Image (spheres, grey):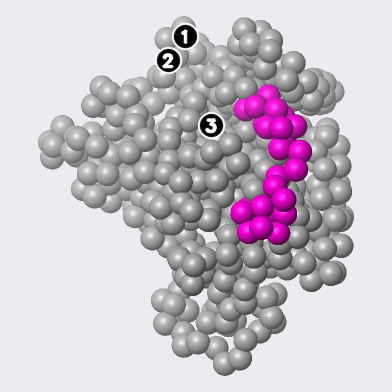
Amino acid sequence: MSARSVDVAVVGAGPAGLAAALAAAESGASVALVDAGVRPGGQYWRFPAPGAGRFTPDTLHHSWRLFVDTNARLDHLAGQQRVHRLAEHHVWSVERADGGWAIHCLVGAEPRQQAARPPITIQARRLILATGAYDRQLPFPGWDLPGVMTAGGAQALLKGHLVVAGETAVVAGTGPFLLPVAVGLARHGARVHGVIEANTPIGFARSPRALLGDLTKVGEASAYGARLALHRVAVRHRHIVTRAVGTDRLTGVVVARLGRDGRPETHTERTVACDLLAVGWGFTPQLDLPLQVGCATRMDVDSSLVVTIDDHQQTTVDGVWAAGESTGIGGADLASVEGEIAGRSAAASLGVAPGPAGLSRLLRRRAALRRFAAVMHRVYSVPPGALDNLPDDTLVCRCEEVTAGAIRHTIDDLGASDPRTVKLLARLGMGWCQGRVCGFATVCLTARHLRRPTRAEDLRAFAQRPIATPTPLGQLAMPPADGTPDVAGG
């Protein structure tokens, strides 16, 4: 494998990664910014694929100005060879090497391209992991029908390929992310029959200090609400989709009101016709690489497993920092602040900078944004009864076709007492997605059936993977390439 050395390697080019790379480089460190995407921005600042059409940013999201400024400064530093931007580099493994870190990458946007290009290894003295997150899903009858997709998937098709995934849509689940998804679909021609929100924003009234700490979020929510009203899209609070209807594809969804106990009230059920259901229950941090290098983790307010960090974003592993959604789901602004702290701290640890300048200001801003995130998670929590009375024939793991009944069978009849044992006995999470889709639901179903709370070790059973991205065996067996190409993989 080819290799080149830098002071700091940043994995992930979303808000946290871009901020970390910029801060480290402007502090004097040489930086490699490694990302699987064709263009920078991650999931927050997604651009259309080449040839997909003209890009129109979401003007309701104030952080676009931050992206434009950060990207321009990184471009300037790249021109001076102080930042090396490595797009289409998929990190499948990280290991210690020569007192630093070896970051092993497959190169190419698609597996076919990766098979034709030699893998790359980046050597770095310090490592910053800004690996982001992906949609959290809960199973329900019919969720495997064509036309049912994650809210993030519908948004990715729209922003990345300018494709509206359906003509008539319902957006459901919980959390503020549902609003821009519904606005985007309506704006581009879909008839959105409603946003089915399991919670209500009234809970924010109990935490005025958190709201005052991030008034921009309030402004964004109000702007999205106004845009939904313009498109005549109703938001139904305290409601949930209980099942999807259809044979070969989605034709409608059944919606019910949630009672005070968090369980659907069957007598309130009604059917809404649609050919697209975009559903999301928040996000799950992408922890493959942090766990691979041995970072300690904890369970956050929203029951997500997140990386444990100190005030400078440093993990429990020497020489490794983490920033963004992997340390707690909080949005682009929080991720950017954490990335800047991590970048400055990593550079300071190398002696190329006197210290993380302006740290007190950044820490105050981070504290305010974290307070808001904590309140947001409490307000938009998963209803306690969302998975109650799930029929036995409902698929939970779609890759291996494992049902809710099979999970209960491993507990009741085979003696499984934790999600890891359930996974081994029923083969959940052993397919293509490696538990990314079904992991959280399996943990919740198992804990609920055992009548105990979810624990951090339960979540780790589905988050830990020896290889972080699908990797062809032939690529792993490939002999070292002759010569040493430059850091951009040329």
Query: Which numbered tag is attached to residue 263?
Result: 2
Toward the bottom, the furthest residue is: 482
- Taking the spot 79% from the left edge, 71% from the top edge, the residue there is 81
Q: Which residues are magenta?
A: 346-370
- Give the labeled residue for mark 3: 281
Left or right for 480, reference 368? left
Left or right for 324, reference 189? left
- x, y percent for residue 192: 71, 30
**Quarter of the rendering containing residue 364:** top right
Viewer-proximal residue among 100 and 146 = 100
Sequence-wise, which precedes: disc 3 or disc 2?
Answer: 2
- Give the labeled residue for mark 1: 259
Say which element carries label 2. Answer: loop
- x, y percent for residue 441: 39, 36
- x, y percent for residue 143: 47, 38
Instruction: Classify 171 as above or below 206.
Output: below
Question: Is residue 156 at all visible to an observer of this figure?
Answer: no
Say which element carries label 1. Answer: loop
